[in-house]
Amino acid sequence: MEAREHDTQIGIWYESPDDPQVAETYGAVIRHLRRIGFKVGPDPRVKKYYPSLSARTRLGFHGHLRVAIEQRGRVVELKFYQNLVTVNRNGGAYDFDRRSKMPYLIRLRYDHTVLSLQRMLTELDVTLNREPMPLRGRAYIEQRRAEWVKSHGPKMYGQPIPAYNAGSADGVSLSDGQAVWVRGRDGRLRHGEAWHCANNMWMVLVAGGVVEHMASFELYASRPLTPMKGRWFEPARVRARLVDAKAKAIASEQFERAAAIRDALAAHSKEPMYLIWSNEHQLYWRPEARGYTRERQKAGLFTAKECGRERHPTLRLIPVGTPEAAAA
């Protein structure tokens, strides 16, 4: 027999479906889950549509952590999931990477439950082989740097970092372990610790053991002076969202909403804006340079400073508000 964990799914396998230990283990798992606080009962959907399978199928929950328990032939299977953070429209049970999607406290409940099950199975002479726990914080950083050293040799770290890979957004040359300020993916300002990864990419350790992968030009050696009120987004991100929202409103024929968004976009853009046309692809650049589009209303708006980094013979800048832009 063997038992193994994959993501948040645990399978306990026996040699034969006729082994009486299969049913005994199924019952022991249910009783143990009830002892540690789970409420376990018949799965309503299975009971309604597949009544012949109901006796060997159970559904349990402890707060927001859920578990589907099933005996099939020679295997007893448990699948843990939650429905608060999901990608699949049918629910968390159908998601991939279920553990990584679990909110922090639910993930702690899951780990506690599996450790308890592991001890219980040991009493039944069943060894549960768990997947390695994903590393967090400095342990993750050390592992990633060790992998790079193994791939590229011992000189990968421990020597001066080239200026073009270490330049911060405020013009400071970064070094390993330096305290930095970053704009998180949610737009909030965070304080962290930066460690060089490869090229101009850095790993930034922020609160909670979270590691963000960011380019050197996204990091600040000192706190930015931009006023902070709640969440804050870079102007380019705001323009991108407004452009996307306006295009969606036009596509759904919500023209009054599109006009309101157009006015908000004009009020937000205090300086001249440009479209970027690719002569090579015969397409516009999308907002934040996220690919290309044929449709004018889906094209991104860029400031002169932003266009300065993109000047290339294959690109043409079209000033917004000119007849050329209107006809485009």
Image (cartoon, helix red, strand yellow):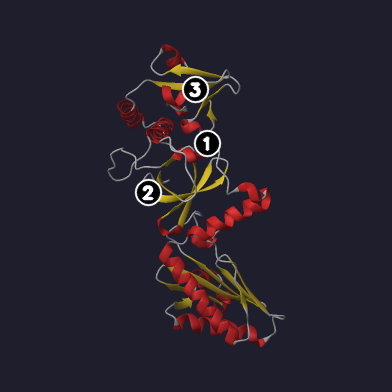
Measure how far apart labels 3 and 2 are at the Cα level.
Answer: 32 Å
Which quadrant of the figure contains the N terminus? bottom right
In front of the other: label 1 or label 2?
A: 1
Closer to the camera in the image, 99 or 252: 99
* Type of the residue with mark 1: Ala
Label 1 CA crowd tier, 10 Å (few <14, some 14–19, many 20+): few
Measure how far apart labels 1 and 3 are at the Cα level.
Answer: 30 Å
**Percent x, y for residue 305?**
42, 24
Any part of residue 221 in sight: yes
Any part of residue 95 in sight: no
For label 3, the SS is: strand
Residue 183 vs 43, above or below: the answer is above
Label 3 CA crowd tier, 10 Å (few <14, some 14–19, many 20+): many
* Type of the residue with mark 3: Ile
Q: Which residue is mark 2?
A: 190
Q: Which residue is mark 1?
A: 163
**Percent x, y for residue 162?**
55, 38
Q: Are marks 1 and 3 in contact (CB under 8 Å)?
A: no
Counting labels gives 3
Residue 275 vs 21, above or below: the answer is above
Asked where in the image residue 25 lies, by quadrant, the reply is bottom right
Closer to the camera in the image, 21 or 130: 130
